[in-house]
Image (spheres, helix red, strand yellow):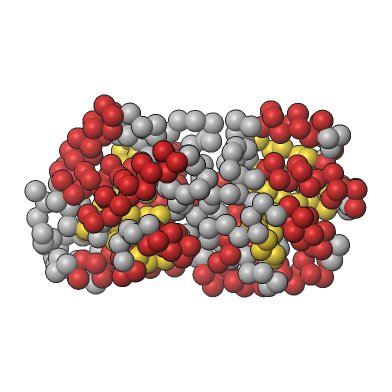
């Protein structure tokens, strides 16, 4: 049993739990939070992750210089596996017993359920869950939807607090009967702004990718997989290219559907108009964003995609489906155009309008950069998270740490 109070001379241990450390927004958010908390005297943070598998790449090497902050839990796997899932609960309980966290902060659907129950069974005083995207919704089958919705409802009562990257996630969870509004806080998923604020439209980099100086680049940053909306771009591409023959779609990311999309581009006679970068490390995203004229985000399931504020930080206008949290940064008529989900004609009209008006692109880009500068600093995310932790500890009458 973990004690309900912590000696004043000892920083609070905060253990984060996530299913895997692939290249993705939720993972980058989690890693940044863990590393950022290390600079605060009140906390000592660490991360438990399942093994990183799949074609999405890995960010485990972020911890190469601080290996003591990361522990891999082999039983914590992404697929549902009753035997391994029970083993993961056992293994996480053992980890919590060893490190005695005052706070366990879980992320992602699978680790969120297993991690919170393991923390509850070990009587961890504060249990926080990070909602980076919906774990249930119309985008999945009825059976899977019912299972995840039920699991979240049953786990909600043992959760001290939820942190969501967008208000849209809070509204979805409240509508599903999970917790009350007092149990939720929105904290935008911050990131290092400097590389994006300094991103340039580098002509040499464009040339290396086969992009001419006068080409108009429509960027999309997402895995090449279902629910990411690439199919809609291919549907409108012929009409768009007829109006703007120099339009180029820069698809940043790898995935299982890359070969399918390459064949689709060829079948449409648009090989020249689609550029596939494949999987790229996060460090290359600012340079790729810099050569875009605008970013399009047409995912059908996303909490609040980092690609949107990252592109906005680089001064790029955005076009997005009004899905989940996109509308909280893509402010229609101010930072870009927000269009109804799967309304391809509205998507086409928005892209045509931006491609044909460089002044509008500049105005939206400037507005977006100012919006993101104020709200998406990684330091602000860490500060708001730390302050929330301290409030929860005070509310539960757990002794405060030095400097709080």
Percent across and percent down for residue 2 are: 11, 51
Q: Answer with the quarter of the image where residue 84 lies.
A: top left
Percent across and percent down for residue 48 are: 31, 42
Q: Is residue 379 visible?
A: no
Q: Is residue 244 left or right of residue 89?
A: right
Percent across and percent down for residue 178 are: 32, 58
Q: Answer with the quarter of the image where residue 369 lies.
A: bottom right
* Residue positioned 43% across, 63% down in the render: 171
Q: Is residue 47 left or right of residue 288?
A: left
* Residue positioned 68% across, 43% down in the render: 230
Q: Nearer the viewer, residue 297 or 7?
A: 297
* Residue positioned 69% across, 41% down in the render: 231
In the image, residue 94 above or below residue 246: above
* Residue positioned 65% across, 59% down in the render: 340
Q: Is residue 123 left or right of residue 46?
A: left
In the image, residue 213 above or below residue 398: above
């Amino acid at each position: 049993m973990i004690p309900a109070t912590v000696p004043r001379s000892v920083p609070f241990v905060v253990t984060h739990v996530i299913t895997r450390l692939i290249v993705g927004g939720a993972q980058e958010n989690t890693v940044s939070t863990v590393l950022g908390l290390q600079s605060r005297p009140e906390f000592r943070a660490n991360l438990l992750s399942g093994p990183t598998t799949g074609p999405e790449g890995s960010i485990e090497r972020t911890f190469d210089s601080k290996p003591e902050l990361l522990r891999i839990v082999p039983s914590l796997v992404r697929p549902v596996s009753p035997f391994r899932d029970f083993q993961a609960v056992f293994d996480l309980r053992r980890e919590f017993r060893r490190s005695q966290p005052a706070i366990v902060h879980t992320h992602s659907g699978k680790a969120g359920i297993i991690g919170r129950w393991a923390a509850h069974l070990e009587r961890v005083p504060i249990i926080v869950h990070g909602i980076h995207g919906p774990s249930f919704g119309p985008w999945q089958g009825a059976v899977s939807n019912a299972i995840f919705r039920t699991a979240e409802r049953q786990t909600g009562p043992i959760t001290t607090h939820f942190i969501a990257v967008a208000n849209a996630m809070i509204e979805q969870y409240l509508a599903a009967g999970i917790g009350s509004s007092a149990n939720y806080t929105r904290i935008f998923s911050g990131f290092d702004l400097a590389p994006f604020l300094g991103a340039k439209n580098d002509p040499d980099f464009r040339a290396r990718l086969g992009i001419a100086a006068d080409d108009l680049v429509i960027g999309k940053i997402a895995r090449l997989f279902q629910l990411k909306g690439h199919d809609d771009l291919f549907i409108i591409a012929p009409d768009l290219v007829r109006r703007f023959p120099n339009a180029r779609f820069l698809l940043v990311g790898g995935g299982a559907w890359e070969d399918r999309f390459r064949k689709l581009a060829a079948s449409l006679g648009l090989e020249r108009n689609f550029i596939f970068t494949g999987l790229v490390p996060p460090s290359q995203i600012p340079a790729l964003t810099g050569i875009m004229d605008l970013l399009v985000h047409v995912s059908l399931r996303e909490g609040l995609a980092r690609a949107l504020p990252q592109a906005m930080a680089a001064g790029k206008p955005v076009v997005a489906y009004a899905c989940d949290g996109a509308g909280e940064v893509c402010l229609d008529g101010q930072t870009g155009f927000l269009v109804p989900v799967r309304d391809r004609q509205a998507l086409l009209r928005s892209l045509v309008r931006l491609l044909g008006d460089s002044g509008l692109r500049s105005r939206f880009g400037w507005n977006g950069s100012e919006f993101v500068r104020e709200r998406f600093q990684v330091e602000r995310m860490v500060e708001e998270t730390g302050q929330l932790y301290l409030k929860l500890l005070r509310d539960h009458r757990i002794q405060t740490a030095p400097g709080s």
